[in-house]
Image (tube, grey):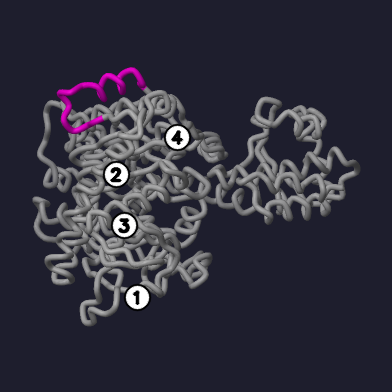
Amino acid sequence: MLNQWLSQFKQDSQISLLDIHLAYFLTNKAKLNDDITAKRFSFLVLSLSKEVRSGHVCLDLTYLTQSTIEPQLWLDLGSPSEHDWKLTLEQAGNHQVVSDGASLSPLIFIENKLYFQRMWLDEKNVAQYFNHTTLDKELSGDADLSAILNQLFVYNESEIDWQKVAVALALTRKVAIISGGPGTGKTTTVAKILAAIMQTNPKARLITAAPTGKAASRLTESLSRAIEQLSVTALNIKAEAITLHRLLGAKADNRSFKHDKNNRLHVDVLVIDEASMVDLNMMARVIEALPNAARLILLGDKDQLSSVEAGAVFGDLCTFITHGYSEPRAKELSQLTGYIVPACKQTVAITDSICLLQKSYRFNESSGIGLLANAVKEGRSTVVKKLLFDESLSDIQYHALSSQQAYHDVLQDSINHYQHYLNMIKQSGTHDIAAVLAKFAEYRLLCAVREGHFGVEGLNKQIELLLAKNKLIHLKNKETWYVGRPIMILRNSASLGLYNGDIGITLMAENDSSKLRVYFPFADGSIKGFSPFRLPEHETAYAMTIHKSQGSEFDYVNVILPIDYSPLLNRSLLYTAITRAKKTVAIYAVESILIQAIKSQTQRHSGLVDLLQNNS
């Protein structure tokens, strides 16, 4: 009976067969008395699976109402109230399937939120770490921190230098959480933090890391430049960044790691860039592997998209960014920096470890990209429309997707950009692979969705056909590989050193022109070629999703939205896309869909904010 009822959910694309089997298994294990309670419980398990797949950490029962459940399904479930849901979970608790966490069970129900055990443990451990470690002061011995800060920064009398405040904050706490938009100098700040730490402890073991290979490579490049520009004498600072998977020593299954609570990392200071991309599970694994005395510095942009997997740890931590510093902390930071750092009487403990970089050095007041990004971030759709139609702003463009012509225009613009790297290949072959990779990386077409004409799959195919028509690439019958094909890795391969999001270009092998190799840039500046048949799961990368673009920057960006609204469209997605551009960004969208996306903002469900707040 239950199995038959559950079979209807096979039509739901967000529910897998494994989810259905799990719901059936746990419902039988719970030994519930009647059909309606069994249906309700199995529906709760399915809903939790669906929520986690959508990026939430838990299922908040508050959202299980008549307005969020299909009418017929609502009737099948007996029109349950919130009290009915709780009674269902209470009955399941009689057979140790659900608990409040006092004893471990497959499901945890606490504070009106339902978790899978693993997610609950991860959230609890992450909260415990930040609640306790953010209170730990970092002792710098006899070092004169004010003198070190003054050596690194020129005093600005007109306004607070928040980069200087961020460095002071990182020098005096074991945890520092630094958020800033594009061009606010996050990498420069990190370079100065590391320089200051090395002056206080020259033997400190420093590691910089990022969630993806592309983000690690970009961090290595930008950090190297920032260190070279420091006013202090040369220090032994290692600029090479690595992926978090490499940091932890990902094993072949990509699910377990060499470093954990029983085999800690050998590090004194760990810096993680693009921290908004770090999901709950990965953050928990990093924290678990950190030595007790190690410092952790997180950098990111709180307004960017959260991780693909469940959780929004960095965003949750930055919830308190506007709370201000406690009076003792503000006094300490003021003494160190020479600025009057504002204080607040009512704060949460974690706020004393957070700093928001507020000045953009990339986009000035007349920058269209900067103005547009801020308006989208704040949900000001009227301002966005005004900016997009302002012809004096040469760095932003809007193209209405009201006709087939606009679709052809974005394809043709992509051809115009990509012809440069393809012509370079024709002229020089493999003589300057680094230049080919750099030229390809100047432009990207970003999509909100994967499928359809306006998604990655459809656009990659159309661009490929147009490039072939223009004789820029040579497509052979039924062969997917050709010289010039850009590739994005979709699955980690620790053995090859290739990770999700890495991008390479297909060229003739350097030593054998009869064979093809896909060449990838690595964080240490090296370039390695791989046989196409050795690569893990991958796809063509003329167009990529906005999610995949995180951690990357391009001179020129085109953003295309689907002509039908999708729940995936929200202001964080659009903000992330816009801020990938350094020189120009063009948006191709139906105006009503664009406005709806700007007005939409998703909030991932978790209990982390409450756990941090309740500790104050």
Q: Say which of 547 and 176 sits in front.
A: 547
Whether the magenta-drawn stretch holds residue 559 is answered as no
Residue 19 on image: x %, y %: 68, 52
Q: What are the residue bounds of the magenta stretch?
A: 380-397
Q: Count neighbours of disc 2 (C-alpha within 10 A) and say few if under 14, some if 14 to 19, many if 20 or more.
A: many
Mark 2 vs mark 3: give the one in front: 2
Q: Residue at x 71, y 53 (%)?
A: 106
Residue 356 on image: x %, y %: 31, 35
Residue 336 on image: x %, y %: 22, 39
Q: Please, which residue is most extreme toward the bottom here?
A: 511
Compared to 557, does 570 lie above or below?
A: above
Q: Amino acid at mark 1?
A: Ser
- Residue 531 is tagged as 1
Mark 4 vs mark 3: give the one in front: 4
- Secondary structure at badge 4 equals loop
Q: Amino acid at mark 2?
A: Leu
Q: Amino acid at mark 4?
A: Leu
Contact between marks 1 and 3 (CB within 8 A): the answer is no
Residue picked out by circle 4? 569
Residue picked out by circle 3? 214
Residue picked out by circle 2? 411
**Is 324 displayed left or right of 94 in the figure?**
left
| Res 141 visible | no
Q: Count neighbours of disc 3 (C-alpha within 10 A) and say few if under 14, some if 14 to 19, many if 20 or more.
A: many
Q: Say which of 335 and 43 sits in front.
A: 43
- Secondary structure at badge 1 equals loop
